């Protein structure tokens, strides 16, 4: 039995979720106020028989215990499994955890270093200048503690000696990026005479440090290097303190610097994180996506050009929703703006425009749209940006807008667009508000069969059968499917996955399958998978509706549940029609073979 199965077998979803929310028994289910969105009327359900959960409210999503923990703690599958394994006393064999222990030592070394730096900032006579600098920025002592700000002594050996005395080895400190090798192979402290900013991950572990000089020397900031636990492109400064607010306010605000985050938080804007001084990366957006779909990016007016817009469209495609931009006054950063007047920042937040609308305004304001030249210039600049939008509805919205602005017919723009992106029109539309669903305790043969077919037959990659990750109710299958979508061969697929899933992956890769009529079988199973998902969702919704009626729920709640139900039945109907035609086709072929 795999570790994943072992954990599933030992865990009781009601018990685990009950540690996070207060569950009330309702018929065969348990219900609660949803922990992922704010609500007054409970629309979050836990299904003990299926060991699954679903929120019929704003989230309209669900899953198994792994997906609950992943969402609640903002961690990936591997970390969720480790957490639940620990809870249930299941040991994860070290073959899946080649470096776990070493990584843990690095987190601990960072934690010890942060504590050391923090104490120095608060108490050391050598930190006088750092203290007055921090005071000049207006940071309160609560802020200094919350962000665990620190000071590194102007010494080559201070931290190294402190940590060696505490049992860390020189090579561990080097791996953590805390010391560096100098001339003659001798190592010394990396951070000296600097204001220290510990960088945490979403789980609150310290992955690295940012450090600022206390005079005018350059560079102003240095960071930890890339280490086994620190990767700048997937770090978000302040995420540990911001995640609750981001989820509650369903909005993440992204700024550039440490100071911006700290000042924002101190002034009550606690949903703010920083991209670590670089442009936002896809990895950072993917981390935020676990907390909210909505993102607003603070941009310098000068930096907000077409290139930045294109990048933002990339983020929109990941989030499947629009990204807003907060345009900062010239040569000001959020730190300046908030300090000058909180109301100005508040106003900028309220005025934030969807990035494409902003780009339209920015480009067309410089053109004379009454002239042919102005019109064609607007099309030339804006069409390539619109072409990058993957969501059909949003792309059409902006094509229509561009058509209105320039007087070019929609049809002409569409033709020009398909020239930019020849594959555009054939891409499958993604059902918009598709519910995500749950997880059975038992392994799911349909899920496994579909996945095994996909893994063993690369030629199916181009198949028109569209499967969504949501259809996989078991998180481990869902993880493999998502990785399969992103990669082209088995070895890079393996790299995408947490090592704890490799055993399950191997099982699927070696599962014995029939040798012929692969495409037909896949089409059949893909459809079965979809139907299973929809039926399951329908059953849960029905149960929720019945409870709602019984308990005299409000009209709005009932209407919402019913509305969701209509969407699901329409899709179920479509799936059945398709299945009929598949069956007929198979029957015809059998007949012809006779
Ligand atoms: Zn919810």
Image: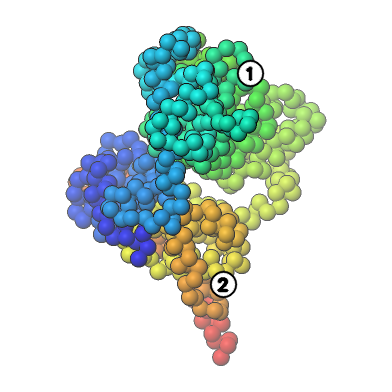
Q: Secondary structure at mark 2?
A: helix
Image coordinates for residue 267, horizontal then vertical, percent: 41, 17
Residue receiving disc 1: 218
Q: Quadrant of the N terminus?
A: bottom left
Pinpoint residue 143: horizontal percent, then vertical percent: 39, 19
Residue drawn at point x = 41 percent, y = 24 percent = 116
Compute the Cα span from label 1 to label 2: 61 Å
Q: Earlier in the sequence, mark 1 or mark 2?
A: 1
> Which residue is pictured at 61% across the width and 43% down the height?
389
Q: Quarter of the image containing the C terminus?
A: bottom right
In the rendered image, the vertical position of residue 556 relative to residue 192, given as above or below: below
Tell me if the residue at label 1 has its CB under 8 Å from ligand 1: no
* Residue 200: numbered disc: none
Left of 114 or right of it: where is 422? right
Above or below for 34 versus 405: below
Q: Is residue 138 visible?
A: no
Task: Label 1: state its secondary structure.
Answer: loop
Front in this rendered view, residue 96 or 452: 96
Q: Position of residue 251 (x, y in %)?
A: 45, 32
Q: Residue at x 24, y 45 (%)?
A: 18
Disc 2 marks which residue? 519
């Amino acid at each position: 039995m795999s570790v994943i199965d072992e954990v599933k077998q030992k865990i009781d979803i009601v018990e685990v979720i009950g540690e996070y929310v207060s569950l009330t028994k309702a018929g065969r289910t348990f219900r609660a106020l949803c922990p992922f969105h704010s609500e007054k009327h409970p629309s979050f359900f836990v299904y003990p028989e299926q060991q699954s959960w679903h929120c019929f409210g704003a989230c309209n999503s669900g899953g198994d215990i792994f997906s609950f923990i992943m969402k609640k703690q903002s961690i990936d599958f591997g970390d969720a499994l480790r957490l639940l394994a620990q809870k249930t006393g299941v040991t994860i064999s070290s073959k899946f955890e080649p470096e776990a222990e070493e990584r843990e030592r690095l987190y601990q070394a960072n934690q010890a270093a942060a504590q050391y730096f923090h104490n120095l900032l608060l108490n050391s006579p050598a930190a006088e200048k750092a203290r007055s600098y921090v005071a000049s920025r207006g940071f309160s002592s609560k802020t200094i503690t919350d962000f665990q700000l620190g000071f590194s002594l102007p010494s080559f050996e201070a931290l190294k000696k402190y940590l060696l005395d505490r049992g860390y080895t020189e090579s561990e400190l080097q791996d953590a990026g805390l010391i560096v090798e100098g001339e003659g192979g001798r190592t010394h402290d990396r951070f000296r005479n600097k204001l220290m900013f510990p960088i945490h991950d979403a789980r609150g572990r310290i992955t690295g440090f940012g450090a600022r000089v206390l005079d005018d020397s350059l560079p102003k900031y240095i960071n930890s290097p890339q280490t086994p636990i620190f990767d700048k492109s997937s770090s978000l400064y302040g995420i540990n303190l911001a995640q609750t607010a981001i989820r509650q306010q369903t909005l993440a605000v992204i700024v550039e610097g440490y100071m911006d985050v700290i000042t924002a938080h101190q002034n009550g804007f606690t949903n703010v994180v920083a991209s670590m001084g670089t442009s936002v990366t896809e990895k950072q957006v993917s981390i935020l996506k676990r907390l909210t779909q909505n993102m607003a990016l603070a941009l310098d007016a000068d930096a907000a050009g077409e290139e930045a817009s294109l990048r933002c469209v990339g983020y929109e495609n990941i989030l499947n929703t629009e990204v807003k931009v907060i345009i900062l006054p010239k040569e000001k950063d959020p730190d300046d703006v908030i300090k000058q007047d909180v109301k100005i920042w508040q106003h900028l937040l309220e005025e934030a425009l969807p990035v494409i609308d902003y780009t339209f305004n920015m480009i067309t304001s410089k053109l004379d749209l009454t002239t042919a030249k102005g019109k064609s210039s607007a099309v030339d600049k804006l069409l390539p940006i619109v072409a990058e939008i993957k969501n059909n509805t949003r792309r059409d919205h902006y094509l229509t807008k561009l058509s209105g602005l320039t007087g070019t017919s929609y049809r002409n723009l569409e033709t020009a667009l398909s020239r930019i992106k020849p594959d555009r029109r054939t891409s499958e539309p993604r059902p918009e508000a598709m519910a995500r669903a749950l997880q059975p305790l038992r392994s799911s043969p349909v899920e496994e069969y579909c996945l095994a077919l996909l893994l063993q037959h690369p030629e199916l990659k181009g198949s028109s059968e569209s499967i969504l990750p949501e259809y996989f109710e078991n998180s481990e299958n869902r993880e493999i499917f998502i990785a399969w979508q992103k990669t082209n061969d088995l070895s890079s697929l393996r790299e995408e996955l947490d090592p704890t899933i490799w055993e399950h992956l191997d099982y699927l890769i070696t599962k014995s399958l029939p040798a012929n009529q692969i495409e037909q079988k896949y089409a059949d199973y893909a459809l079965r998978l979809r139907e299973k998902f929809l039926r399951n969702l329908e059953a849960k919704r029905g149960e929720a509706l019945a409870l709602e009626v019984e308990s005299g729920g409000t009209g709005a709640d009932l209407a919402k549940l019913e509305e969701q139900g209509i969407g699901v039945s329409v899709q179920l109907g479509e799936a059945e029609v398709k299945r009929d035609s598949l069956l007929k086709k198979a029957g015809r072929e059998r007949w012809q073979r006779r």
